[in-house]
Amino acid sequence: MRYVTLDIQQSGINLLETNGERVMRWSTTPLPDGLIKNGVIVHPASLATLIKSLLVKWGLPRGKVIVCLSGVRYIPRVFSLPNFKRSLRVEVIRHESERRMPVPLDQLHLSWRRLSADRSGERYFVVGVPRRSVQTLVETMAQTGIKNYALDIKPIALARLVNVRESVILNLEPDNADVVLVVDGIPETIRSLPVNRNPEAWDDTVREIGAEVIRTIDYYNSTHLDRPMDPEAPIFLTGSIAGDKAAILPLDQLFGSRIAPVAPLMNCPEGFPVLGYAANMGLVLGRGKSKKLAVLASSPAMAVGIEEQEYKPAGHSGRKFVLAGAVALALILLFPTYQARSGSHAATSSLAQELAVAEGNLRNSVKVTDSTRELKFETGLLAGERQSVLGNQGRYSESLSQLLSGLPNGVVPESVTMTSENLILDGTAVDLPQVINLADQLEGFELFDGVYLESISSPGPDGINSNVFRLRADYLHLESGDAGK
């Protein structure tokens, strides 16, 4: 069967045609500046016109078109869940994702695959994709008039192509770099970094990307003390820049013999730039692989893409609300028994997620067993993930983390809610001056138009912290030119 894959980048579109096992044609088409920004298609109609003209030039596809978008931020998670009825799977996974993802679910699309199952429960690989990026890509493809198409996740497509159960993948493109850590066949960490396109600063840019890879590995190891990455795990370089020996020289000096060659799992003609079209080939392996290639897949996690039912809007029915309630009740009843069977690492990881600043209730019934150092690592990663997904709004999480880490004795935050317009902080304090001091600290970050004491009341002498307060901080809306400051 014929497959046409589109790797849409800020600077251009990589188009590849295969028959599932052999590369047939390929091309790269530059894009005008401004069509795509930070993993979001700004002008879907204009991009759709360009894609349609490309496909008409090649001959309208008789097979499936598979698409990925560069620069999108992804949040991967591995969930261990108790056994449950198949009919409740969607609700159970969404319920756990709401607890574990650092971004509200209404801003994410979820995709998942089951990794394993036994008597104690099941493990799932779940990926959160920013809803806005998916919606603009869907809108673009709808305007091309192409009906038979699929959306996929670029870093996972790269991991499919490499197909090594423990590895580091660094994809270098003119506009962004993707870092993927694969452990036991699972893309445990996925990062997308902007790239400085200034040729005069290129060596410094590559060195900083290399340093970021090392920091990412160090972070992973510090939060997975029971199963750190192999210090000699191979590093695979992909992307259009990876084929330029002079451009990647700083990486050769940094990683040396750990850099391994990419061996594509399909037949390629002589002269075909494998590294530049690595993502395209990975797209084919995910959606259109033959039986011969299927047996080579290293993990069920590699099959994750953006499923059709996930990116089409769904209505809310009464049945769904009933199911949601049933799921919550089932998890409450099942999790104590399940957690008793789970290892201490799973409990520690779940707890660290629960304690992530500004991501839900700050007071919960789980006892704190993590060390301060591990919590700081976990909170730092979640803040980074939130910032990468939400863009400039993510800066508020970092400032809030600093604020809450230095609260005076007697002030207890109960919950933090972050909406698109403001931040709401509820808590208790010994007296009013402490609340006013807290408001002054929020204003000191210079990220808010104003900080307001919405309410304060004393429910009576039932404890030391008797003053219940609510602070509202309205976001400072920056001009587009200031967004990166």
Image (cartoon, grey):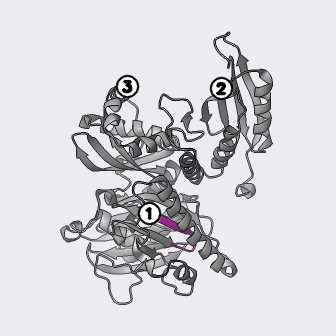
Where, by quadrant of the figure, is residue 361 drawn?
Answer: top right
- Please, is residue 221 above or below residue 78 in the view? below
For label 3, the crowd category at 10 Å Cα-Cα, with few meaning under 14, some 14 to 19 and many 20 or more, is few
* Marks 1 and 2, the one that precedes in the sequence: 1
The residue range painted magenta reads: 172-179
- Is 126 positioned to the left or the right of 246 in the image? left
Quadrant containing the C terminus in the rendered view? bottom right
Q: Could you tell me which secondary element the residue under label 3 belongs to? A: helix
Is 478 on the left or on the right of 232, as rendered?
A: right
Q: Earlier in the sequence, mark 1 or mark 3?
A: 1
Q: Main secondary structure of the magenta part?
A: strand
**Foreground pick, 135 / 217:** 217
Residue 52 to residue 113: above or below: below
Quadrant where the image shows the N terminus: bottom left
Corner quadrant of residue 344: top left
The numbered mark at residue 427 is 2
User: Residue drawn at (29%, 75%), measured in percent from left and top?
Assistant: 265
Residue 10: percent from left, percent from top: 56, 68
Q: Amino acid at mark 1?
A: Leu
Q: Which mark is nearer the camera, 2 or 3? A: 2
**Observer able to see residue 454:** yes
Find out whether the residues at labels 1 and 2 contact each other: C-beta distance under 8 Å.
no
Q: Looking at the image, is mark 1 or mark 3 nearer the viewer?
A: 1
Type of residue at label 3? Gly
